[in-house]
Image: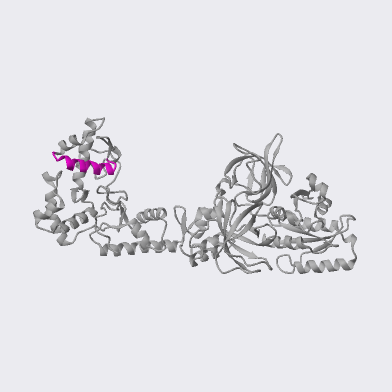
C-alpha cells in the first residue's frame, strides 16, 4: 500500500511521517533551512509480516500544489493531517478536493498538535473536518488525536494504518506495466535511475521497456521495490528502476514521463474525458486554457465542450487538446487547474485516448463515450460494439486500457467476436454487413446486367455504417472466403453472375468484332470508320465499345481507337520478343515493322504500354517489364509475368491525358448510373 499525506502547510505532515517511520522526508537543504516540504518526500515502513508500506509526503504550501498532485496520483490511502490549533485551512480543502477527483477512496484523519489546545478547540476542529468530509468517499473516515511531541495517539494511528494496509486490495497486477516517473537521477556505479509508483502490471529485471511519450527504448538492469532490492516490481509499489540503453540518461527522461511495456507506447494529444467541476468555480468555456495534471505529468491543454455548458459543481463531457503528447491510459484520473496554476477547478477520468477532431459532438460519438465509461473491459467492449459504427479496434482498446497480454484473445473468445484485421464485431452485426452487401450486389446486377460488377468504393459507400477503405478491403476478403461475393479486379460480383449485353447490343457486337479481329487486329478501324462501314451512328459504336471495354473485351489505346484484349496480349509478346533480340532496348520502328503497321499507331500502342508499366522508355528505346507480361492475359508463347488484367485496376488509363478511372475506361466513358 502507498499512503499519502495531505493537508495545509505547517500542520505536521512531515513530523508525523518521521515519528511513524523514523525517516525524515525533507531531504533538500532548502527544506531543512525553511522547515517546510518543497519536493515530494518518501519513506518506507516495514511491517511485522514482512511487507513494506510506502509513504508519500507532499508539500502543503499553495505554491507547491502541482508537486502535491505529482505524488497524489499514486496513493491508495489519504492520511489527512489537520492541526488542532488551526483547523481546516485552504490547502486542507484543496487537497481533499484533489483526492476526491483522483478517485482515492480511503482516508484516515490525524488531528495533530492536540497538546497545544483545549478540548473545546479539538471538538470544534472535529466538527469542521466532519463537515468537510460529509459527502463523497471519505464520509465517516476515522479521526485520531495525535501529538508528535508527546507521542499521544501515535500507537493507535500506527495500528490503524497497518490494519488498513493488510486489508488493502492490490492494484491491477495482471495489466500491462506502467510506472509514473516522479524522479530521475544518476547513481554512481549504476547509471540512470527513475523512481515512481507502478500504476499497473509488473516489471522484472531484464525486461525491455519504453520511456513514453518520447519513445526512448531501455532495459531494466535492476529494481528496488519499496526500498528493497527485488527481481520484480508490482502494481501498487514504489519502485526505482535502473535503466540502460542507447540514449538513456538523466536528461533524456523527464519528470512526468511514463516507463511502460513496449506494447503500450502510443502517446496522444487529444483525449475525450468526463469532468467534474468543483463547486464555486466558473463554468467551463469553449477552448478555455487549463493545466492538466495526470500522474506525475503537468501539461497545458485546451477544453472543447462536447455538450452543454458545465456549471460549477456539475459533470460533463469534454475533449482535451494537449499542447504536447501525453502517455496515459483510458479511465486514468486527472485534475484540471486554471491557466495560471493558482487553483484547482475540477478533474475526472479519461474515456478515449483516440478522440476524433471532427464530429466529436455527434449523437453516435456521445453514445460511444457512454459505453467507454464502463470499468469492466468485456462489458465496455460489448456495449461499444452495439452502437454505430458497430466495430472497434480491439488491439487499440486493449492497449489504451493498459490490459495485459492475452486479453484480446480472451475477449474475442468470451464475446464470440468476428475479427477483421484489427477490427472486432459482434456476430450479429457481421451477419448484417454481409446481408447488406449481398442485397446491394443483387440489386446492382438486376439494374446493370451488362456490367461485370460494382466497384469496391461504390459498394463501400452504399453500406452503412461506412468502413474505412483499407479495412473494407479486408472485410471483402472475408466475404470472398464465405462465398458472399467474387472479386474481379476492383469489380465485385455475386457468384454465378456474368456480364451480358442487351440482345440488340450483342447483335451489333457480333458485326463489330470481325472488323477489329483477324488480319486487321493490329490496325483496327477507329470508331468513326466502323460506324461508316456498318452504317450506324458514331455515338452508338462508341457506347458499345465502352460497354465491352467494361467487360474487358477491348481497351481504348488511343482516342476512339479500340484493340481486342487478346490482341494487346499478343503485342506484349511481340514486344518481349523484340526486347530479347535487343538487350539495350528496341525502338518504335522495329515494333512497327513487326506489326506491319503505321508509325503513328505503333507509337500510340507503345505509349499505352508505357503508361501501364509494360514497357519502360529511355529516350527512343524501350525495355520490357517482365513482371507485367500478363497484364492483358498470357502472351502467346510466353509464361512469365506477374500482373492480372487491367480491367478494374484503379490505376488503369486508356489514353493520353485521361483521368484514372476504375474498370479500364477513361474520362470519356459513359457516366455511372445512380
Locate the C terminus and report the quarter of the image it occupies: bottom left
Along the viewing direction, whichever of 260 and 350 lies nearer the viewer: 350
Percent of width and height locating residue 478: 38, 54
267 displayed left or right of 550: right
Q: Residue at x 65, y 69 (%)?
A: 312
Q: How many marks?
A: 0
- Span of residues in magenta: 596-614
Residue 135 image position (x, y, % from top left): 72, 69
Q: Is residue 310 above or below residue 662?
A: below
Residue 603 on the magenta span: yes
* Vertical arrangement, residue 381 with respect to residue 651, above or below: below
Q: Measuring 18% from the left and 47% from the top, which residue is drawn there?
A: 563
Whether residue 135 is in magenta: the answer is no
Q: Is there any visible trace of residue 345 in the rendered image? A: yes
Residue 160's spot in the image, x, y percent?
80, 58
Q: Is 129 left, or right, of 100 in this rendering?
A: right
Query: What's the magenta bit mostly, secondary-structure-wise?
Result: helix
Residue 635 visible in rendering:
no
Q: Left or right of 40: which side holds 421?
A: left
Indicate the quadrant where residue 117 lies: bottom right
Amino acid at each position: 500500500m502507498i499512503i499519502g499525506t495531505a493537508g495545509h502547510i505547517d500542520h505536521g505532515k512531515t513530523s508525523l511521517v518521521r515519528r511513524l517511520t523514523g525517516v525524515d522526508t525533507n531531504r533538500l537543504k532548502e527544506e531543512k533551512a525553511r522547515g517546510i516540504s518543497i519536493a515530494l518526500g518518501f519513506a518506507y515502513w516495514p511491517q511485522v509480516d514482512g511487507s513494506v508500506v510506502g509513504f508519500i509526503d507532499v508539500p502543503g504550501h499553495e505554491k507547491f500544489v502541482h508537486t502535491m498532485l505529482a505524488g497524489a496520483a499514486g496513493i491508495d490511502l489519504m492520511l489527512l493531517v489537520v492541526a488542532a490549533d488551526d483547523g481546516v485551512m485552504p490547502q486542507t480543502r484543496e487537497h481533499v478536493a484533489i483526492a476526491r477527483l483522483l478517485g482515492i477512496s480511503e482516508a484516515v484523519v490525524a488531528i495533530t498538535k492536540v497538546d497545544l489546545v483545549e478540548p473545546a478547540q479539538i471538538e470544534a476542529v472535529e466538527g469542521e473536518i466532519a463537515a468537510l468530509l460529509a459527502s463523497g468517499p471519505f464520509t465517516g473516515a476515522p479521526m485520531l488525536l495525535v501529538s508528535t511531541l508527546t507521542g499521544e495517539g501515535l500507537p493507535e494511528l500506527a495500528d490503524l494504518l497497518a490494519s488498513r494496509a493488510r486489508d488493502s486490495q492490490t492494484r491491477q497486477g495482471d495489466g500491462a506495466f506502467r510506472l509514473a516517473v516522479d524522479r530521475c537521477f544518476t547513481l554512481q556505479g549504476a547509471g540512470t535511475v527513475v523512481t515512481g509508483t507502478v500504476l499497473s502490471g509488473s516489471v522484472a529485471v531484464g525486461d525491455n521497456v519504453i520511456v513514453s511519450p518520447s519513445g526512448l527504448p531501455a532495459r531494466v538492469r535492476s529494481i528496488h521495490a519499496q526500498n528493497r532490492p527485488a527481481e520484480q516490481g508490482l502494481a501498487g509499489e514504489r519502485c526505482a528502476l535502473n535503466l540502460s540503453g542507447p540514449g538513456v540518461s538523466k536528461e533524456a527522461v523527464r519528470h512526468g514521463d511514463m516507463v511502460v511495456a513496449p506494447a503500450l507506447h502510443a502517446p496522444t494529444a487529444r483525449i475525450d474525458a468526463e469532468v467534474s467541476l468543483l463547486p464555486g468555480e466558473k463554468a467551463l468555456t469553449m477552448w478555455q486554457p487549463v493545466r492538466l495534471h495526470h500522474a506525475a505529468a503537468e501539461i497545458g491543454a485546451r477544453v472543447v465542450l462536447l455538450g452543454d455548458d458545465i456549471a460549477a459543481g456539475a459533470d460533463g463531457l469534454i475533449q482535451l487538446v494537449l499542447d504536447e503528447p501525453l502517455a496515459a491510459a483510458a479511465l486514468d484520473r486527472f485534475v484540471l487547474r486554471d491557466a495560471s496554476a493558482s487553483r484547482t477547478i475540477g478533474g475526472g477520468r479519461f474515456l478515449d485516448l483516440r478522440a476524433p477532431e471532427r464530429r466529436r459532438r455527434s449523437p453516435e460519438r456521445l453514445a460511444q463515450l457512454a459505453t467507454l465509461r464502463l470499468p469492466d473491459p468485456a462489458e465496455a467492449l460489448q456495449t461499444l460494439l452495439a452502437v454505430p459504427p458497430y466495430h472497434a479496434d480491439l488491439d487499440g482498446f486493449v492497449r489504451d486500457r493498459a490490459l495485459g497480454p492475452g486479453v484480446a484473445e480472451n475477449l474475442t473468445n468470451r464475446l464470440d467476436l468476428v475479427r477483421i484485421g484489427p477490427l472486432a464485431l459482434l456476430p450479429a452485426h457481421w451477419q448484417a454487413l454481409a446481408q447488406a452487401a449481398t442485397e446491394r450486389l443483387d440489386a446492382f446486377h438486376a439494374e446493370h446486367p451488362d456490367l461485370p460488377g460494382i466497384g469496391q468504393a461504390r459498394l463501400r459507400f452504399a453500406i452503412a455504417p461506412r468502413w474505412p477503405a483499407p479495412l473494407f478491403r479486408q472485410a471483402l476478403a472475408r466475404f470472398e472466403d464465405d462465398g458472399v461475393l467474387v472479386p474481379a479486379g476492383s469489380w465485385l460480383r455475386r457468384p454465378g453472375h456474368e456480364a451480358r449485353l442487351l440482345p440488340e447490343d450483342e447483335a451489333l457486337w457480333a458485326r463489330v468484332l470481325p472488323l477489329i479481329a483477324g488480319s486487321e487486329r493490329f490496325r483496327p478501324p477507329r470508331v468513326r470508320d466502323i460506324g461508316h462501314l456498318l452504317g450506324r451512328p458514331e455515338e452508338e459504336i462508341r457506347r458499345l465499345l465502352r460497354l465491352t471495354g467494361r467487360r474487358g473485351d477491348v481497351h481504348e489505346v488511343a482516342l476512339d481507337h479500340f484493340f481486342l484484349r487478346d490482341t494487346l496480349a499478343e503485342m506484349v509478346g511481340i514486344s518481349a520478343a523484340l526486347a530479347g533480340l535487343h538487350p539495350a532496348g528496341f525502338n518504335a520502328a522495329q515494333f512497327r515493322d513487326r506489326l506491319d503497321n503505321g508509325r503513328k499507331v505503333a507509337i500510340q500502342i507503345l505509349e499505352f504500354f508505357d503508361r501501364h508499366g509494360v514497357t519502360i522508355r529511355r529516350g527512343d528505346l524501350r525495355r520490357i517489364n517482365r513482371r507485367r507480361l500478363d497484364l492483358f492475359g498470357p502472351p502467346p508463347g510466353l509464361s512469365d509475368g506477374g500482373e492480372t488484367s487491367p480491367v478494374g485496376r484503379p490505376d488503369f488509363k486508356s489514353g493520353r491525358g485521361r483521368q484514372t478511372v476504375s474498370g479500364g475506361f477513361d474520362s470519356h466513358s459513359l457516366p455511372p448510373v445512380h
